[in-house]
Image (spheres, grey):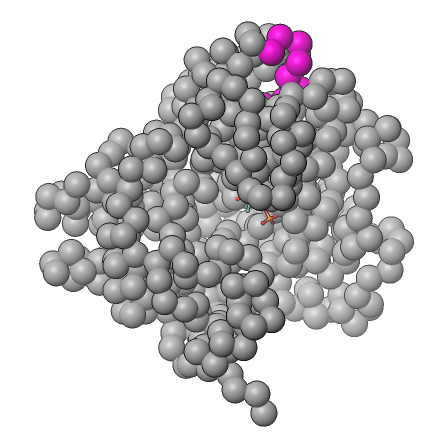
Amino acid sequence: MESRNSAQLFERAVRVIPGGVNSPVRAFAPVGGRPRFISSAKGSILTDEDGNSYIDYIGSWGPMILGHNDERVVAAVKAQIDRGLSFGAVTAPEVDMAELITGMVPCVEMVRMVNSGTEAVMSAIRAARGFTGKNRIIKFEGCYHGHADALLVKAGSGLMTAGTPGSAGVPEGCVRDTLTAAYNDIDSVQALFEENRDEIACVIVEPVAANMGVVTPEGGFLEALRQICDDNGALLIFDEVITGFRMGIDGAAGYYGITPDLVTYGKIIGGGMPVGAYGGRKDVMECVAPVGKVYQAGTLSGNPVAMRAGITQLEILKNNPQIYVELAAKGERLRNGMRDIIERRSLPYCVTGIASLSCLYFTQGPVADYQAAGRSDTEKFADYFRFMIDRGNYLGPSQFEAIFVSAAHTDAQIDKTLSDMDDYFAG
Ligand SMILES: *Cc1c(COP(=O)(O)O)cnc(C)c1O
């Protein structure tokens, strides 16, 4: 029998998997130490191969909004599995899913299922370029849109110039048409439109930026993006891979009352299975093959088992809108508790967030963009992270990850976490 505790597993893993992980965010590189191998989870609790349990504040990075291993979702998956895993032909669950999404989100008139958020964004951008006949795109510093070549543009000094690759292996040609603006800074967007007249296909934004900690849009920012896109014949894409079905059943678009042209989904939409989707205006989506000339395909796209997991989770959310009220209250409880600790102990830190997304920045606020977030003391965060995980609180192993609460978290669990936090700062 192969050894199975976290230390032994990690030793085996690093020999055969780069860094021992299948996604870099799982590595503990930013905080030191080695990752805990998770063997099971239920509700808000993760259990590792060493028998430790943790209150989970990552929720698989978003999907587990109902908590882990929800019985209704699991039952739906098991029922579908008995009928077969994949057919490579059309199935009823795909139609159910598309009707469900278009019914929940008014701006999504048509939708195409894919297998990840990365794929959703990559495909939405291709559709936007195909529809407008323009090549350039605008993204924001600190917003993450998956690992497609064109979107791996390093945030940096080149605000008003064309991007440079943020990853080795991305040829310059792939990011030549990616322009980068500053979040919450509409002037930086205006300047790019002026310098690239009639060349911008779309602006893509995380309506709440949840990949540089949590940065909320300032009043008027999203409205101004909508206007600037309309004025210039560009499409507005909301990347709702995190915010979709989290800010409410109609996502950030509904929450802020903005109508994007295209929306991308991932995470929650699959209920824990690998699913993504992009959708929006019918006239744009009809550019996609086989109706239109924008090619996009997927052998396992709309997989019936994955669809059943996602449909079941989305239906629960749709039929129980009080979940969102409770999630927001739990988020507020956590943020208020963190603010109280900071103020009481006069710490030079700041708390941000909205609804079930929160962040404790190890820098003085306000944090409204990537540059401000980047001033965080990541070494202090690492020390705090190690204390918190040893006390049974599983936070994202990086300053720049959101803290997620789920419907399964109790006030008592949040209070326990706050109490541990207070102990940490008591020194
Ligand atoms: C996670 C994420 C993605 C990428 O999704 P994957 O499923 O990891 O490919 C894209 N956009 C946003 C906003 C995300 O948070």
Residue 99 lies, in percent from the top left, at 73, 41
The residue shown at (60%, 26%) is 178
Count the labels in the image.
0
Q: Does the magenta stretch include residue 198?
A: yes
Asked whether residue 315 is in view, the answer is: no
Residue 81's place in the image compared with 212, above or below, is below
Depth check: 89 or 98 in front? 89
Which residue is at a point 87% across and 56% down the rendered structure image? Answer: 88
**Where does the magenta region start and end?**
196-203
- In the image, 4 versus 83, the foreground residue is 4
Q: Position of residue 196 (x, y in %)?
A: 60, 11
Q: Quadrant of the N terminus?
A: bottom right
Q: Residue 21: x, y in percent?
A: 54, 64
Instruction: Using residue 234 as the reference point, say whether residue 385 is left or right of it.
Output: left
- Relative to 41, does residue 110 appear above or below in the rendering? above
In the displayed structure, does residue 88 sit left or right of residue 253? Answer: right
Q: Position of residue 64 (x, y in %)?
A: 52, 57
| Quarter of the figure with residue 386 | bottom left
